[in-house]
Image: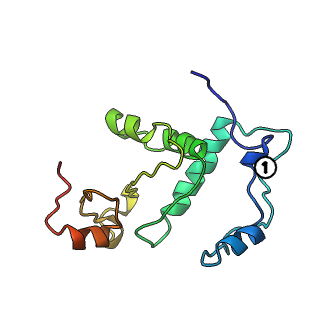
């Protein structure tokens, strides 16, 4: 197995387009939280070490946990998710850790529920997930429940 120790930098395919280009391509997306039009993380002569990818990924997970939305789509490179998820969940059961730390296939979709355990008891709107796993297409929870009201998530 080849272990590639870096993620960002050097390769042009690892550099994102400008935000202005993305705004033209995706006019319905809010890019206001992105600080720079240019990709300031990409460097032409330096590859990002895996540990730095994981640290950057954990900062992203921590930011996700501050969001009030209950369903968020994350679209990114598989390497970013791989290194982030390997750093995340050190207290998970080994079988769960193995499952979330698998390499992603091209265009692979995975659904996850991430709960900040420090919020338990502070409001069920952030931590009370019904545990239903939709059968068939991976639909948003509210749509899946409407289409499959008797689904319990048990297989």
**Where is residue 102 drawn, in percent x and y?**
45, 36
Which residue is pictured at 67% across the width and 41% down the height? 52
Q: How is the image coloured?
A: rainbow
Q: State whether residue 15 appears in this view.
A: yes
Residue drawn at x 50%, y 41% as measured from the top left: 105
Q: Which residue is mark 1?
A: 42
Q: Is residue 117 above or below residue 71?
A: above
Q: Horizontal and vertical percent for residue 80?
A: 60, 45
Q: Quadrant of the N terminus?
A: top right
Q: Using the rendered view, name the quadrant where residue 117 is placed.
A: bottom left
Q: Is residue 116 left or right of residue 12?
A: left
Q: From the viewer's perspective, tell me whether residue 22 is left or right of residue 75.
A: right
The residue carrying pointer 1 sits among few (fewer than 14), some (14 to 19) or many (20 or more) residues within 10 Å by Cα, namely some
| Residue ranking furthest to the top | 1
Task: Name, please, the residue furthest toward the bottom.
Answer: 28
Q: In this rendering, does residue 35 appear at all? A: no
Pinpoint residue 144: horizontal percent, then vertical percent. Answer: 27, 67
- Residue ID at (66%, 72%): 31
- Residue closest to the eye, 65 or 155: 155
Please tell me whether mark 1 sits on a helix, a strand or a loop: loop
Q: Nearer the viewer, residue 126 or 110?
A: 110
Q: Is residue 28 left or right of residue 125?
A: right
Going 52% across and 50% down the picture, which residue do you hit?
A: 107
């Amino acid at each position: 197995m080849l272990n590639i120790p870096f993620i960002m930098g050097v390769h042009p395919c690892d550099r994102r387009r400008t935000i202005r280009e993305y705004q033209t391509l995706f006019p319905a997306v809010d890019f206001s939280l992105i600080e720079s039009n240019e990709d300031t993380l990409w460097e032409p002569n330096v590859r990002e070490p895996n540990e730095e990818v994981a640290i950057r990924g954990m900062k992203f997970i921590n930011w996700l946990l501050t969001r009030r939305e209950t369903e968020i789509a994350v679209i990114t490179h598989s390497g970013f998710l791989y290194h982030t998820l390997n750093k995340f969940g050190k207290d998970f059961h080994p079988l769960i850790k193995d499952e979330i730390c698998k390499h992603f296939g091209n265009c692979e979709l995975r659904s996850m529920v991430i709960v900040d355990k420090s919020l338990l008891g502070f409001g069920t709107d952030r931590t009370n997930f019904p545990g239903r796993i939709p059968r068939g297409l991976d639909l948003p929870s509210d749509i899946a429940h409407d289409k499959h009201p008797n689904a319990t998530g048990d297989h």
